[in-house]
Image (cartoon, coloured by chain):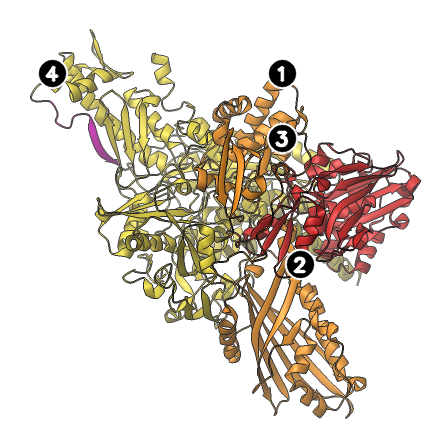
Amino acid sequence: MKPVNFDYARPADVGAVLALLDDQSRAVKLMAGSQSLGPMLNMRLVQPDLIVDLTGVAELRRVEETAGDLVLGACITHADIEDRRVPDVTRGALPTVASGIAYRAVRNRGTIGGSLTHADPSADWVSMMAAVGARVRLRGPSGERTLPIEQFIVGALEVDLAANEVLVSVVIPKLSSRARWGYYKLCRKPGEFAHAIGAFVTDPERGLCRVVIGATETRPYIVTDARHLLGDVAAGGPAHKVDPATVDAFMAEQGMHDPVDRQIHVTAFRRAIEQAR
Amino acid sequence: MKGEAKSQGIGASVLRREDDRLLRGRGQFVGDIKLAGLKDVAFVRSPLAHAKVHAVHVPEAERGRRIFAAADLDGVKPIVAITALAGFKVSEQPVLAVDKVRQVGELLAMCVADTRAQAEDLAAMVELDLEELPAVHDMVQALEPGAPLLHEHWGDNVFLESAMDVNIEAAFDAPVKITRTIRTARQSMAPMEGRGTVAVWDHRMEQLVLYTGSQMPHIVRNGIAECLGLQQRQVRVISPDVGGGFGYKGILLPEDVCLGWLAMRCGHPVRWLEDRREALTASANCREHYYNITAYADRDGRLRGIDCTAIVDSGAYSSYPFSACLEAAQVVSILPGPYDFPSYRCKTWSAATNKCPILPYRGVARTGVCYTMELMIDAIAREVGMEPYEVRLKNLVQPEQMPFDNITRKHFDSGDYPEALRRAMAAIDLPAIRARQQRGEPDGRLIGVGHSIYCEQAAHGTSVYAGWGIPMVPGHEQATLRVTPDGGLEIRVGVHSHGQGMETTLAQVANEILGIPVDRIKVVHGDTEYTPYSTGSWGSRCAVMAGGAVATASREIAKLVKGIGSHLLQAGSDDVNLVDGKVVTATGSVSIEEIAHTWYRRPQDLPAGIDPRGLETTIGFKPVRDSGTFSYAAHAVVVAVDPEAGDIELLNYVIVEDGGKLINPMVVDGQVYGGLAQGIGTALYEEMNYDSSGQPLASTLADYMLPGPTEVPAPAIDHMETLSPYTEFGVKGIGEGGAIAPPAAIGNAVNDALRPLGAELYQSPMTPRRVLEAIRAARQRASAQTVAEGV
Amino acid sequence: MSMTHIALTVNGSPVAGTVEPRTNLADFLRETHNLTGTHIGCEHGVCGACTLLIDGVPARSCITYAAACEGAAITTVEGLDNDEVATELRAAFSREHALQCGYCTPGMLASARDVVLRMDNPSEYEVRVAMSGNLCRCTGYVGIIRATMSVLQARRARGIAPLSGAGREGLGPVGSGHASAMAAPAAAVAARAAGDATPAVARSGSRAAASGADSDWKPHTTFDQSFTVRHPVDTVWEFFGRLSEIAACLPGASLTGEPVDGHVEGKIRVKVGPIAAEFNGVADVTRDEATRSGTIIGSGKDARSNSATRGAIKYAVKPGATPDETRVDVQVGFTLTGVLAQFSRSGLVQDVANRLIGAFVQNLEARLSPQAEGAAPPAAAEFDAGSLMTSMIRDRLKALFAKLFRRG
């Protein structure tokens, strides 16, 4: 199938993007690498009047380092991160996760902003960015606001982004040398969507102790203070055996009713811990 | 020179003639064909599985101009694929639906525009007035009393019932009796290239030219001519480069007929390229079987009898030419496989359901049959406490029985089945695996070993298909051979090569006999205008049949060459030999080049009595017995099952194959590798589900999971090469075999791995969820047992 | 018709043309420039057949639009004739029998070339993972992996070092970022030859509704629930006769007209991520005084996605334990058909639909509760936003997203 016909614009700056978004007379859809939107357009599931291509905005391809953070423009690709064309401030966590997203040919165009805005619960960035404590900067007609990922992701495929706003950058905290992380996803084959994701990041120096159980049927379960789930690992200790019953109970509490689902999520989480680095 | 010439004949792994164009993106697939004025077609399809069609509302301005519905298609006959089997019920598949739709994706209107996108815009303008009817979404449900009826006048949903009973009562007193229900999933053949058709009316030739990716261009021509009421001379079917078939391109689609009708009417070429969504959900599926089977055995593992009922989900219509019944009817005759046992009963139904029609996919019914039979053999082994291979060795047909007629009167031409199994077991090193299982794995995974064995009846011909009575019965396979004026060779065959490498391997056959170098031989195929009639490429028949035809014709050409050569050498025709492309006597020689030059360019040098056929012949071939060659293989596999995640990894895979004489071992290995990949898909990944309203639930390749590079191991392959007594060079057909055994071998390995947990799986694909659910069920049974014992 | 002018480089030569913005790069190359070596296998970015080189690295040409490649350098398989790595790969592919039908081959070569250039000293498994975005249905990948490994190893043995990122230096999606800005056409909606304005809805909807009596129809998913309200049975029975009240209890639903003889038009709005669907349809009501039971059957169609939904609410009211209590038995069922339905489902539909009926029943109870009697209907937000219907459809769609659009 081919998409419906649509108009196309490629603004040069965010201001022009916002001006186009302001047009109430037509259905406007933002496009970055088109790796998520493309299939939906091709199946006519999305039928926009106007596509606004964000890749002409130089600001969105920019990378900045501050004392405590790395700020990635929304149009930075998975391959940019995988290949370390942007600095790694996460002790390898982000490049490692990036290298497992979809396929190389997709990673060369798929973007971090597009992925987070799409907010698929099975997406790697949704879980890992939440685990690392990243924030997103959203710009609208009345200025810019910053949200932590766990507030930005409202639900499956739903984010706190107004129709007249655009995600401009992702702010990633620099992890200290004492930080540890783990990430494990259960897929049936590489590039296939995850059936279960376990992720954690601890950094005693930044007071970070987060666990994310992703690829759930709804938004990922994000635990911002996960000392009770992480045990010794939180304190920088060796990887230990996770108590499956605790995690299982946690997920049941969150509303995951199917025991097989819970089992594979426990497994993914436990393996993330076992692979702590 | 002699060595070089020999190295291109039978048995040489000659690199493929077709590779270069494909590696440079210069192949020509249907979608690559550009004709001036070409327009694209998109179809309006039913969103419902079963509905009355009250109206198809086409905007008045477009009706009959750019959009066409059933009422516009005057004089087009529905597609009907009959069989001669008693009790068969006929379905009529209108090319555009008239009163009723019976599957999601059924065609309702045809839209034509400059581009596919614009044609889809037109399709979106068509309004459908459909009254939804309850759908038959499952083959078991289809047979229940009171089920909704697809074809009301039938009175039920059964295309055909087949049955056989050979002394089953004699097995009833067997000490071991095991009953299982076994299911295989509906699948999509999923060649990487979808279907596609470009149609144009050629006024000069008074001919409809239909370019379509087909395994059987001559059969498509039959069907098109019949549906459109044309003479055969008025239809030319060209099947260019084809991006994989596997059975999917062995069917006449209503789209083909629609495009033909449109091309005759609209004055410009038209094109329809099937998209992936159409391929998965609308055109055809395959493989969905249900078995309820009981095996009877003695305590020593000897099989006493098999008693089985089976259903094959045949979809809404009988597809042309193979019909809706081939598969279920085959189950009856092939279920016993390579086993020799005394009692047998089997009854099968071809069930009509509100799903797309089924096609014979690589392996056809054998994959499901092998899965069923081999899982039962292992169940017997577990029951009687023997190794599964020991049970198999007890029951396999023995080499000294060859040729062998089995319980369903299948004629096994040759082979040593126990030897194949023994070699496979040696290669997989069963004792080492058993020891490893005892030790356990550091990562907690469970190791299992499994194997399976099957026979592949290939190139079965007239005597078999006359009985089926489908629209296509293969007779003699013909080849046309012509030495060109420069001493090269043209081979024209009616089969089609779409990955099998026949542009190379058929040249090797001619090279073997004539000594003409392979790079001077051109194989012409895929065009009804240029090739002899053939039922096409299916049933692992091409090496045997087309190869046989080329060999037969090559011998005839050799006679003609020798006739002219002996004249040029002034020798008697009995005093010359053809050696390495030269006609030789004790004293001299003349090359085929010189002979060809003489025939074509210097006829004045030939005597009056020279054979007027010159250097060209068309001749047919049939094996001495046409009941088919029986190739076979034993597969053995070691798996690791992750009891926490449900994942199954294939650690080692071994195949011992007997395909008779191999024409090109490299190509044969390629067929085995590819078949294995598809078999792994069947075993572990591929599943076309429908919901209870008949909606297909896999409409993309993200839903329908094909194995990728990390899912398919490189197997070790060992060849036995027992010659068939009935064919040229002893060749046997092997194209499908690789896809037959893997689900059975992997299924047995998984059940072996799960044995300590008391879990068993009898449904493919063996997904992580099914594995985990089987484990949970076993644990629940175990704890219930404990509780019961405690009480 | 909306057209966009583009200029880019294809196989080293400048190419310019006018395209519809919806034209993907593969179609642009194939249809406009006859570069048919780029094959289309799925149009969803999954199979990899259309993989080619954009700015020197592999990308999918089926989900990359030509308009977005302004100024980019495209290399198709036809442009690799003299490429050193591709030449080595072609020889290896032939030698290792790494192709049969040849349809996936151009995409395979694009990815294999990237692997050879980029990866240092990978294991066979790593090469398999790196090639996993390209599907082959013929070869079982044996020859493909052997050929790729052999070229890679031979080059490393010759001292040719790997090239990080295959030499890419810029940031952002490949192919993008070369171009100057392009303004949108005036705020006129892109010309559509067809479609949305056409009310395909009413007709098919009314047909389905008119067949509400077709007792054969069975909803795909059905849920039964019973509850008791503290209200006399006559009042409850009367309440169920007021269609607008019932509709208000169904999340996401609203009536677009007044009920006439138990027949009413309505709609359900659904928005899931970027997908917006509006099911317009009709509902018919039947009531049986004798048994105090009734049926509401509704059906609607979303014109854009050519999807339809159909639902039935069956209810029966009976005297409760005391005279001022009424027992209500409700059965809610629904079926979704068409494009939106045709993806593998998550295991959660049961749970989601349970929540739907839970909310419906909750709303019913709220409306029937003594406190609400005579009071204004609950705030519109509670019923208008369709949050629950949204969540139902969303979860139904979830697998689609999860599987197709999981680009990290």
Q: Which residue is mark 3?
A: C127
Q: Position of residue C302 (x, y in %)?
A: 56, 66
Q: Residue at x 75, y 42 (%)?
A: A184
Mark 2 burial class by Cα count in 10 Å: few <14, some 14-19, many 20+: some
Q: Which residue is mark 2?
A: C347
Point out the residue furthest to the left here.
Answer: B608
Instruction: Specify the subunit that label 1 lies on.
Output: C
Q: Which residues are magenta?
A: B609-621
Chain C hue?
orange
In the rendered image, the quadrant that contains the C terminus of chain C is top right
- At label 3, which amino acid type do we have? Val
Q: Which residue is mark 1?
A: C157
In-image side of B675 versus B440 (left or right): left
Mark 2: secondary structure? loop
Q: Nearer the viewer, mark 3 or mark 2?
A: 3
Point out the residue furthest to the front here.
Answer: C186
Mark 4: secondary structure? helix
Instruction: Specify the subunit that label 2 lies on.
Output: C
Q: Earlier in the sequence, mark 3 or mark 1?
A: 3
Q: Which residue is mark 4?
A: B605
Instruction: Specify the subunit that label 4 lies on.
Output: B
Q: Nearer the viewer, mark 1 or mark 2?
A: 1
Q: CA distance from mark 1 to mark 2?
A: 51 Å
Residue toward you, C364 or B86: C364
Mark 1 burial class by Cα count in 10 Å: few <14, some 14-19, many 20+: few
- At label 2, which amino acid type do we have? Gly
In the displayed structure, would residue A178 be above or below residue A128? Answer: above
Residue toward you, B406 or B135: B135
Are discs 2 and 4 located on one and the same chain? no
The yellow one among the chains is B
Chain A hue?
red
- At label 4, which amino acid type do we have? Asp
